[in-house]
Image (cartoon, rainbow, N blue to C red):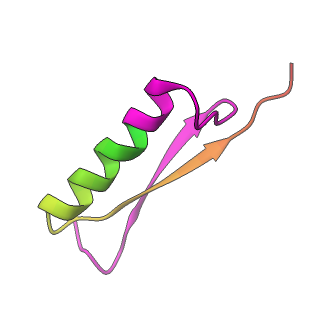
Amino acid sequence: MNPLNPRRLILIGERHPAKPAHKGIEVSIHLFNRETPATIVPEWIPISA
């Protein structure tokens, strides 16, 4: 992956920062971006019930 061409990671569902799993996803993406030359940009897409 080209670091100048970041990849979007689409996450389906409402983002809840208080949920450990959601925080873990964002921390994991941050660590990936820090440790590799690639860049992933997360994008939460809410769903309607």
- Taking the image as shown, residue 28 lies to the left or right of residue 42, namely left
Q: Within the magenta stretch, is there residue 8?
A: yes
| Residue drawn where x is 61% and y is 44% of the image | 44
- Taking the image as shown, residue 40 lies to the left or right of residue 42, namely left
Picture mark count: 0
**Is 35 located above or below residue 27 in the figure?**
below
Residue range in magenta is 1-24
**Is 23 located above or below residue 1 in the figure?**
above
| Residue drawn where x is 58% and y is 38% of the image | 17
Residue 37 percent coordinates (x, y): 15, 69
| Residue drawn where x is 22% and y is 65% of the image | 38
**Looking at the rendering, in which quadrant would you find the N terminus?**
bottom left
| Residue drawn where x is 29% and y is 42% of the image | 28
Residue 23 percent coordinates (x, y): 45, 37
Residue 3 percent coordinates (x, y): 25, 75
Give the residue at the far bottom of this rendering. 4
- Taking the image as shown, residue 47 lies to the left or right of residue 40, namely right
Instruction: In this rendered view, identify the residue nearer to me: 21 or 46.
Output: 21
Instruction: In this rendered view, identify the residue nearer to me: 18 or 8.
Output: 18
